[in-house]
Image (cartoon, helix red, strand yellow):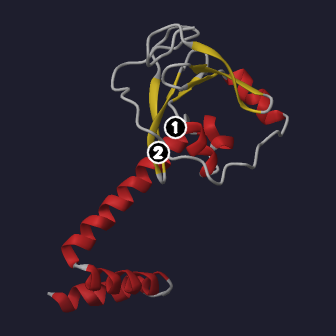
Amino acid sequence: MYCPVCQAPTLHPHDLEPGFHAQQCQRCEGNWIRAAAYWQWRSHGTLSPEYAQSPSVTPVDTAGLKWCPDCHNLLQRYQVGGALTFALDHCYQCGGAWLDKDEWAALKRDGLHEELYHIFTDAWQRERRETERQHLSEAQFRRRLGEKAFDHAREFKKWLEQQATRSEILAYLIHEAE
């Protein structure tokens, strides 16, 4: 099998977890995960708890297009989100997933290895984009207002959300600000 990154026949059987078989590249150490193998592993409940000290992801230069080692379709990239800033590659045709070196360990460390195939859903990607948008918006307001004013505004917002008359309070503030 050809590695999607190295473009060489370097994929060989490898156990990511006990009872969970993948194909690992001998050069870049990335892993090809077949959907059937993943779901079979998940259905047996053989999750390994030894991941507290997992290494951080080592970036691999994978800017080019990647092709599925099984069915040779183009792999689509999906951002993981949260504290994990990398993207995973997924084949829409056969359902396989490519994880670069150390990405499995990072998913395990963050408890997302059990959610691997949820990452490829529209709902997950929408939630990830909305969370990212909220963080960017908050950072922009923090820069504009300054730390102290932003913290006061955020505390006021929390208080305001608990008020039954919040619309009237906002109307009053807008009226008084004019």
Residue 6 in picture, x, y percent from top left: 44, 16
Q: In this image, 172 relative to 178: left or right?
A: right
Q: Position of residue 76 (x, y in %)?
A: 45, 24
- Taking the image as shown, residue 36 lies to the left or right of residue 67, namely right
Residues at discs 1 and 2 in contact (Cβ within 8 Å): yes
Three-letter amino acid code of the residue under disc 1: Asp
State the quadrant of the N terminus: top right
| Residue 58 vertical position relative to residue 3 in the rendered view, above or below | below
Identify the amino acid type marked 2.
Answer: Arg
Query: Residue at (51%, 32%) from the top-left corner?
Result: 101
Q: Residue furthest left?
A: 178
Q: Looking at the rendering, which quadrant does residue 143 occupy?
A: bottom left
Look at the image and tell me in which quarter the C terminus lies: bottom left
Q: Residue at x 42, y 53 (%)?
A: 130
- Which mark identifies residue 126? 2
Q: According to the image, label 1 marks what residue?
A: 122
Alpha carbon of mark 1 to alpha carbon of mark 2: how far? 6 Å
What's the residue at 53%, 7% (across, down)? 9
Could you tell me residue 120's position as x and y percent? 55, 34
Residue extending farthest to the front is 27
Q: Is residue 115 above or below residue 24?
A: below
